[in-house]
Image (cartoon, helix red, strand yellow):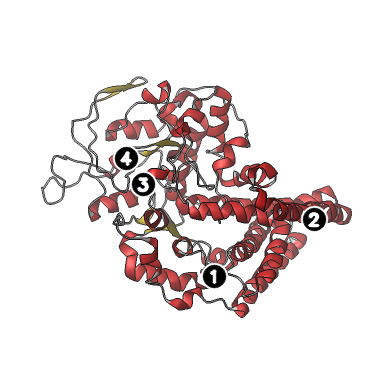
Amino acid sequence: MAPAPSRMAAAPSRMAAAPSLGTPQTFSRHIAGETLSGGRFFCIFCFPMASRIADSLFAFTGPQQCLPRVPKLAASSARVSPGVYAVKPIDLLLKGRTHRSRRCVAPVKRRIGCIKAVAAPVAPPSADSAEDREQLAESYGFRQIGEDLPENVTLKDIMDTLPKEVFEIDDLKALKSVLISVTSYTLGLFMIAKSPWYLLPLAWAWTGTAITGFFVIGHDCAHKSFSKNKLVEDIVGTLAFLPLVYPYEPWRFKHDRHHAKTNMLVHDTAWQPVPPEEFESSPVMRKAIIFGYGPIRPWLSIAHWVNWHFNLKKFRASEVNRVKISLACVFAFMAVGWPLIVYKVGILGWVKFWLMPWLGYHFWMSTFTMVHHTAPHIPFKPADEWNAAQAQLNGTVHCDYPSWIEILCHDINVHIPHHISPRIPSYNLRAAHESIQENWGKYTNLATWNWRLMKTIMTVCHVYDKEENYIPFDRLAPEESQPITFLKKAMPNYTA
């Protein structure tokens, strides 16, 4: 594969001048927002920036802004890596690790606004040991951060350990999935119709989650893991996507590229780190990116939906005819379905019965896809350094959600086996996951959905950096990062 384009080159001058956060004192004060100057809040929503957002399947980690101080590690040589003194887990928070590189960082005295910090010339421990990984996991909101997969392990090696039964398609189980989604969505519409105004948010949350199940059914159809009849898959997939006004074939083509190039810089069609040069391209773009990757990030899949799926120029000539058919179906639904809704219940009824559940769906679309592949320790690699097995196993996160969400969304959160082989039907993902845990469990990233997890993603995982994986916006442009400062102050840091 060709190397990644030069748009991911080194950061411009502002990047070069970014202050170091290598010491616990500096970091804890910085993350508390002390280094951020005031400034006028300026918000711009920009669709083009969202072309990096996940087209894949589908909400709260992240280091806290004011993380409590953590007791020092014991100073005995048995517990602390050679040359390291009193390292805290918080020191590791912004020191993302790469799969194959081992580096030492020697922080020096730097100035961050009016704050001075001096770090001893020693490095924080790498994430090689179990203790180090436990510290990182606690800081990021994970249950487990996996070991690096050896380079000589291939994707086929992993697939060969899976039971053959997990690849078997069962039409009855597929029909059961459809019945669950249709029934739960119908119940949601009934709840919306009957609920008093103060219970509507609960009804919308249920209905938005239920309609996300439609997306997962269409997703299985796109991967040819729903039915033994391929024509049935195309019909069901198209119909399942219609209430979401999502064109089935355009999404399928783009999503296939996400699986082929998961966590590959530039080429993955899912969430990408922000390129440094794009962040520095203009003040307007910078403010738009900060706002988009900050407060509205759980709904930024809407921008991705607009930007990726309706432009015929984004598709190969061999794909265009099928794309046109899907677009015609979506526009027909909008031309007929929306006016009927307005005719029956009015504009406010359209908002109440369609728009709000649709926004709920996009919350899950954005959240699931973010959590699946975004964390400070999970790198995006240029094409010449990319390893398929590492990207799919080490670069994918299994996250547990409340049971009702997992049921309505057909276990889309059980995502590692899906990236080992997209041909595994959703109703077999749990069996495949158990097999992976038995054979490859020490290499997997595991989490339970929590505030700290989402906080980490939304306040740390921003601009691409080859060594650290991600650099937060407020390290590069503190005076313009008020949305990130707000999230750091407003979002809880709970893991339970």
Query: Residue 228's x, y, as percent?
Result: 62, 75
At x 34% / y 26%, what residue is drawn? Answer: 19
Q: CA distance from mark 1 to mark 2?
A: 28 Å
- Residue 389 in the image: x percent, y percent? 38, 57
**Mark 3 crowdedness (10 Å alpha carbons): few <14, some 14-19, many ≥20:** many
Question: From what the image shows, is residue 203 above or below residue 54?
Answer: below
According to the image, label 3 marks what residue? 377
Residue topped by disc 4:
95
Q: Judge whether residue 471 can be spotted in this image.
A: no
Instruction: Tell me which residue sits at (66%, 68%) in the image.
Output: 233
Q: CA distance from mark 2 to mark 3?
A: 42 Å
> Which residue position holds label 2?
333
N-terminal label among 1 and 3: 3
Residue type, mark 4 in image: Lys
Q: Which percent across, then down, holds residue 313?
A: 67, 42
Query: Residue lying furthest front in this view?
Result: 318
Going from the N terminus, do you reach mark 1 or mark 2 first? 2
Q: Earlier in the sequence, mark 1 or mark 4?
A: 4
Q: Determine the secondary structure under disc 3.
A: loop
Judged from this view, the residue extending furthest toward the right is 343
Image quadrant in which you'd find residue 467: top left
Q: Would residue 65 be found to the left or right of residue 305 on screen?
A: left
| Residue sitting farthest toward the left | 77
